[in-house]
Image: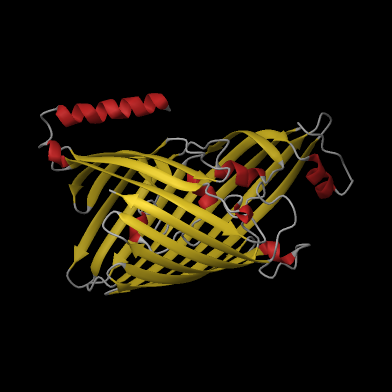
Amino acid sequence: MKKIYVKMIMVLAGLMITGNIYANDTVQIHGFMSQGYLKSDGNNYLAESKDGSFQFNEMGLNFKMQATDKLQIGMQFFARDMGPIGNDEIVLDWAFADYKFKDYLGLRAGKIKSPIGFYHETRDVDILRTSILLPSAVYDENLRDSANAIHGVGIYGDVTTDFLGNFTYQALVGTQNISTDGGTAKYISQTLFDIQHVGLDSILAYSLQWVDPSSHLRIGGTCFFTEIEADGVTQNKKKWDGISGGLFEVPEGTAMDNRTRNIEEYIGSIEFTWNDLLVAYEYKVLKTTGIFNIYFPEFTITSLAPLDILGYYGLVSYRFLPFFEAGIYYGEFFVDANDRDGSKREVDYLSWQKDFAVSLKFDINDNWIIKLETHYFDGAANLNLELNPGTNAKYWWLYAAKVSYVF
């Protein structure tokens, strides 16, 4: 990965000094740094928040350059610490070349931000939203490493009409590298096996948005298709004993794999803005089938686990003063859309996670931002089991604070 950083910096530096660019002022350098604090009761969320945690920070540095009138080049380095995830390791968050033939047709190649819902592509830009945390019913922070960007190529365009408004589209194809220590690997593991390799198959992603002629209403849809393969060995024998019910024993270190097939994610989004008011609603459906294989010396156990995940939320925010805005949102997440009441589970509230949040945002100046946020949760369906190995609380609170500097 370090070799990639060096090569990218060399390319960028070379383009800065070549005669093919207009001037040094075409190179834009921006960045952000933030430090947050999480405190909860009942369950740990994203970090060891029951004890209070400062392991909630992120930073990024990005470069963009208009190489010619049609070609733009950019990249961003990013690091975060979110409990057991990230640990401030620097990664290449995105990096691509963007050639715009016409307004209605452009080409991107490199590591391209995934078009997931309305707000994933700008989730790093803290100044653009009121909340500290995007609604987890649609935007899961634990899965950011697999959903963040696509290594590949894509086309995009804008079509503007006088009477029908503006249409924007994207289509991408590629893949993504996933760390065995990242959030996606931990989500797949569920503390049951030590993942030694994890990877995404080919990814297809599409996005279509429409903005009405008055620019107040935006409606869009995105879809995302891929497969995930993970290999490793079993761990946590006590938990396996509970799963098997004494019918068979799973020694630690037994070879195991997980094949998550035919992942299909669909998100429908709608947003209305009027002066200082913003109202939004998004609805997500994710369908897939997990195939688990445990390889014993004499035989193999195969288990099929179809998933039909559902999530949605509604959000309202309003800027009351030039330096102050507030917002609320309510979201619901279900592990199984066909079992919303949890009747198929031994503990029903592990089937859902309902989140009511209140956010306050203070713009100290053009660079400094302070945010405060309170969440009330019902359910525990979307928790990191590494942080919550025991019994989970049904009703619980989360308090968050965050200070950000952007430039």
Way the structure is coloured: secondary structure
Q: Is residue 72 above or below residue 404?
A: above
Residue 245 image position (x, y, % from top left): 87, 49
Q: Is residue 225 visible?
A: yes
Q: Is residue 110 visible?
A: no
Residue 200 image position (x, y, % from top left): 52, 39
Residue 22 image position (x, y, % from top left): 10, 37
User: For residue 259, what is the image quadrant?
Assistant: top right
Q: Is residue 316 above or below residue 8?
A: below
Task: Give whichever of 323, 129 is nearer the camera.
Answer: 323
From the image, which quarter does the N terminus lie in?
top left
Task: Give whichever of 374, 60 is nearer the camera.
Answer: 374
Task: Give whichever of 361, 262 is nearer the camera.
Answer: 361
Q: Residue at x 71, y 49 (%)?
A: 304
Total labels: the figure holds 0
Q: Residue at x 45, y 63 (%)?
A: 372
User: For residue 280, what is the image quadrant?
Assistant: bottom left
Residue 268 image position (x, y, % from top left): 44, 65
Q: Residue at x 23, y 50 (%)?
A: 105
Task: Give whichever of 172, 246 is nearer the camera.
Answer: 246
Q: Is residue 41 above or below residue 249?
A: below
Q: Residue at x 36, y 43 (%)?
A: 60
Q: Is residue 26 left or right of residue 120?
A: left
